[in-house]
Image (cartoon, helix red, strand yellow):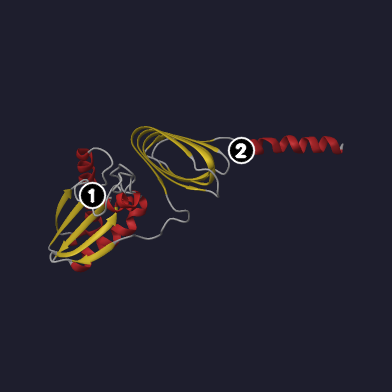
Amino acid sequence: MHRVLALIACLGAAPALAQGVGPLIVEGNAQSRTLDCTGRDVVVRGDRNQLTFTGGCRSLEVQGSTSDIRAELAPGARVSLRGETLDLRWTMQGDGPPPRIATEGRQIRVEQVAAGPAPRGSQLTRRETARGIALNLSGDELFPFGADRLRPESAAGLQEVADLIRDLRPRAMTIIGHTDSVGDAAVNRDLSLRRARAVQRWLEERAGGAMPAVVVEGRGESDPVAPNTYPDGRDNPEGRALNRRVEFVLER
């Protein structure tokens, strides 16, 4: 009798075990989720997704477009990115060989970032100029890679801008979008203009009657504040991150 009960217990536990170590498949569009991928193979299929994977993925395969993926990878993880306008920021769990990353498509960005929690709150900077007050917000804080739709977390920084507009009542305002040098220059100019307009629409809804006359510009990659590459031609991720930004000038 005890043997029968033990066998039943083992059989009952087997499906849960299999589920825990099986592949993690995420399908669909416009999702924003955080998932535990500890020791699992991850497959993502879809467009316009914002996904975060924690715990150390054994492998990661992404198929789609205009998606922003953050992943904690196990040492030696296999990574495949296929599509268009994909952004992968990864950290590695523990010590060991780096991930093996393969890409196929257009405008695919892969960047290793420091481990630890993402910074909270906005990263709005402010300085006084002859024209008025100049503000700067990181493009990565505002938008997914290659897209002009605002992230949900962009509200913190934009609300600070809206509050300043209501408090200072500027007579005019200029909103300028900037990109890094990844991709075609004409595409980057168009993207930076669309991003500036998206920010303008958000502010007009929140600032109401305090919103002054606005000039919107998209300068693309033409006005960098840091080098996009090192002198030897290697990519400079930190410099590119500084160049992806939206500027605001509140004129007195």
Label 2 packing within 10 angstroms: few (<14), some (14-19), many (20+)? few
The quarter of the displayed image where residue 2 is located: top right
Instruction: Give the quarter of the figure containing the N terminus.
Output: top right
Q: Residue 165: image x %, image y %?
A: 21, 63
- Residue 34 has which mark? none
Q: Residue at label 2?
A: 21
Judged from this view, the residue extending furthest toward the front is 232
Label 1 packing within 10 angstroms: few (<14), some (14-19), many (20+)? many
Residue at horizontal 16 percent and vertical 49 percent from the top: 217
Q: Residue 68: image x %, image y %?
A: 39, 43
Circle 2: residue type: Val
- Callouts 1 and 2 close, C-beta under 8 Å: no
Circle 1: residue type: His
Q: Nearer the viewer, residue 201 or 234?
A: 234
- Residue 178 has which mark? 1
Number of callouts in the render? 2
Q: Residue 120: image x %, image y %?
A: 40, 59
The secondary element bearing badge 2 is classed as helix
Residue 62 against residue 207 in the figure, above or below: above
